[in-house]
Image (tube, rainbow, N blue to C red):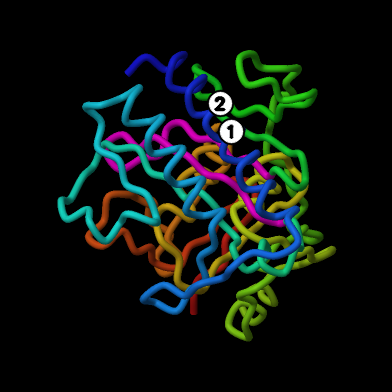
Amino acid sequence: MDYDTLVAVMRRLALEAGDAILEVYNSDDFEVKSKSDASPVTEADEKADALISAGLRAAFPDVPLVTEEQAASHGQEVSTFLIVDPLDGTKEFVQRRGDFTVNIAYVVDGVPVRGVVYAPAKERLFYTGADGASVEESGDFAKDAAGPVTAMSVSDPDNSALMVVASKSHRDQATDDYIGKYGVKDMTSAGSSLKFCLVATGEADLYPRLGRTMEWDTAAGDAVLRGAGGKVVRFDDHRDFTYGKPGFENPFFIAYAPGVELKPAE
């Protein structure tokens, strides 16, 4: 894989998808439908999925592609592939809270090695460079050329005063009980894959997720976090978190800065 080309294409498609999403988001009204698993889907999800899928297939025709909106038709198991969530945080989108993201990642042998997370309503753009190191871009987000970037690096956490980020829409008692095992200075909540990015920038130290997620929800944020020196492990046994699993369903997980002293699940 030519990573210079890959990163440029993923970045451009994420920005173009963001434009399509904001066009729907800023309209007076939009239809919200329910998928077979009762999760919401909008015209914005479908437009962004079509745009990104077409762009990736044109640029990388030989690389398997898995997207949230087309996953049901993807029967084969894969270990090296492109994976897309065109609009993560549809609930935030529907409620016009702004915490939604475009996510595109490249997984090699089960590991997300490159990714882009774009939060169009918040005007934040995070991605791994061709060298694998993560950056946050500022500027006007021109499609054909990257603007100024700032290197991202996880925190050097104080285990007696951690900053914890948790889900805005999926917080539960089990999550609170686990967080209670740590010395916590403050808590923040965020929607979508932004939680990974907050750990990657050092704005948070720890993000535990004790709830159902799919690989397209996490792969891009996971790649960005890894590229900033962070880690993602399984919640139950702290083993490495992998991709290309049957059905693309994730176990519970913990995303964190490596200086955090992880507590056991029980």
Which residue is label 2 attached to? Answer: 12
Q: Assess disc 1: are there few (<14), some (14-19) or many (≥20) residues with their C-alpha within 10 Å of its C-alpha.
A: some
- Disc 1 and disc 2: Cα gap in Å? 6 Å
Q: Is 260 placed above or below 252 here?
A: above
Which residue is depicted at the point 64% across and 34% down? 126
Which residue is label 1 attached to? Answer: 16
Query: Tag 1: residue type?
Result: Glu
Magenta residues span: 99-119
The mark found on residue 25 in the picture is none
Which residue is depicted at the point 48% across and 62% down? 253
Quadrant into which the N terminus falls: top left
- Front in this rendered view, residue 196 or 177: 196
Q: Assess disc 2: are there few (<14), some (14-19) or many (≥20) residues with their C-alpha within 10 Å of its C-alpha.
A: many
Q: Left or right of 75: which side holds 206?
A: right
Which residue is depicted at the point 54% across and 62% down? 42
Residue 28: quarter of image = bottom right
Q: Left or right of 248: which side holds 217?
A: right
| Most frequent secondary structure within the magenta stretch | strand
Contact (Cβ within 8 Å) of mark 1 with mark 2: yes
Labels in figure, total: 2
